[in-house]
Image (cartoon, rainbow, N blue to C red):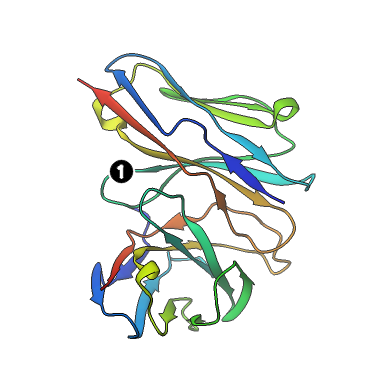
Amino acid sequence: ETGVTQSPTHLIKTRGQQVTLRCSSQSGHNTVSWYQQALGQGPQFIFQYYREEENGRGNFPPRFSGLQFPNYSSELNVNALELDDSALYLCASSFQTSSGRAKNEQFFGPGTRLTVL
Amino acid sequence: AQKVTQAQTEISVVEKEDVTLDCVYETRDTTYYLFWYKQPPSGELVFLIRRNSFDEQNEISGRYSWNFQKSTSSFNFTITASQVVDSAVYFCALSEETGANNLFFGTGTRLTVIP
């Protein structure tokens, strides 16, 4: 068991709505990354948070935003939902040193499956 | 630019057969990390292995083995004596030294082991 948890498991929204997904990182980890996995595709990097600040971002529009809290848990917020946002959203936690250069393995949660109608 | 290619979309084997999953990567970094993850039907990505670019030693873990060859930019994964529980989608991924600690994934290979 990885220790990374995500909620909710499933979610159905309509186009134009907003959604918040949550992730609790594994004990001892200080970094959270979010990925979007469309059906039949590999996960795509959305962004990463390290010590409560965004530490890198993939090719996603600003309506995808996030937060990391002092306990290293994280939220992913998506505004103005579009049909193409339907996907499995995966959260991964890892540990980085203060130099940010330790590329340790990321451990994934079970994901939240979002359906936009 | 970074890229991971898994040319095999789907593979089916009969139980106890050996199977190799191919992975080819592209990166301009001299320091990088390669990973394999398993995604069973439940959806959770399960970490299998990490290899850094300076370590070309092959690795064996039980029925799993990995062959890393920098000369051909490949990081192939072999399952020996496959079992039905090995049925899953397998992803190869790359992380570069520069930038955020994010993973670039291939499109995955769906392995079906037939009993």
Q: Between residues B110 and B43, which one lies in front from this camera angle?
A: B110
Placement of A105 over or under A49, stated as above or below: above
Q: Residue furthest left?
A: B115
Horizontal and vertical percent position of residue B49 = 52, 39
Q: Nearer the viewer, residue A85 or A89?
A: A85
Kindly indicate the quadrant of the structure image that contains residue B75: top right
Q: Chain of mark 1?
A: B
Q: Is residue B17 above or below residue A3?
A: above
Q: Identify the residue shown where x is 55% and y is 42%.
A: B35
Instruction: Name the residue type under label 1.
Output: Pro
Q: Is residue B42 left or right of residue B109?
A: left
Residue with the mark numbered 1? B40
Label 1: few (<14), some (14–19) or many (≥20) C-alpha neighbours in 10 Å: some
Q: Position of residue A46 (x, y in %)?
A: 53, 68
Q: Measured from the top left, where is residue A37 in percent x and y?
A: 41, 58
Residue beneath the point at 59% across and 67% down: A59
Residue name at image x 52 percent, y 36 percent: B6
Percent coordinates x, y for residue A6 in the rendering: 33, 68
- Residue drawn at (39%, 50%), measured in percent from left and top? B45
Q: Secondary structure at mark 1?
A: loop
Q: How many marks?
A: 1
Which corner quadrant holds the C terminus of chain A?
bottom left
